[in-house]
Image: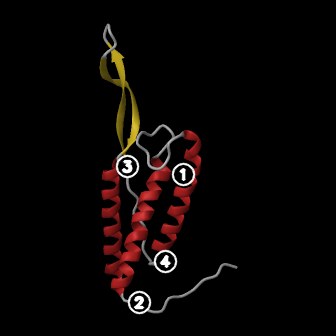
Amino acid sequence: MAKTFQIGPMPVDDLEPILRKAAYDAAMNSALVDHITPRTWHAPTWTNPKAFRGCQAEWQGRFLRAKRLVEAFGVEYEPTSEEETLTVWWRHKKQGAVGNEWNPDYDNPEPSYRGVVHAEACRAAADRVVRRWRAVL
């Protein structure tokens, strides 16, 4: 049986940062689990495909913990979209007689993680979750 504990009544202002952090983590990690693949360029925290499965399991665990915490506040977490998470990346290929001209290979686009853009989208999603929670109070 899991040990549980209950915190006495806390002021709303003390609970808000806890909810905001949990909503941010849920949005961030749900997108990492759903959209990041071994082919994704600039993906966070892994350097080779063999380490990807371990990172994906870690992201999944973080997501589930954060989602449960957000739901404990009585609101749903807000996921971020694939457009907010990924963009397109083109490898460069050598061209020319000498092979010293590098041009984008537009025939082979690959997904690329948008770190700063995605982090800002997660912050905005967390703000919306907190606003919904405050509206219910």
- Specify the label residue 137 is tagged with: none
Residue 71 x, y percent position in the rendering: 47, 73
Q: Give the quadrant of the N terminus.
A: bottom right
Q: Residues within 10 Å of mark 2 (few under 14, many from 20)?
A: few
Secondary structure of residue under mark 4: helix
The residue that appears at 54% across and 51% down in the rendered structure is 55
1 or 4: tag closer to the N-terminus:
1
Question: Which residue lies at the image location 55% right of the left edge and 40% below the top edge?
Answer: 49
Q: CA distance from mark 2 to mark 3?
A: 35 Å
Q: Residue under label 3, please give it.
A: 85
Q: Which residue is mark 4?
A: 72
Of circles 3 and 4, which is in front?
A: 3
Q: Depth-wise, is mark 1 or mark 2 nearer the camera?
A: 1
Q: Earlier in the sequence, mark 2 or mark 4?
A: 2
* Sequence-first disc among 2 and 3: 2
The three-letter code of the residue at mark 3 reads: Thr
Disc sitting over residue 55 in the figure: 1
Judged from the image, the secondary structure of the residue bearing numbered disc 3 is helix
Circle 2 is placed at which residue position?
10
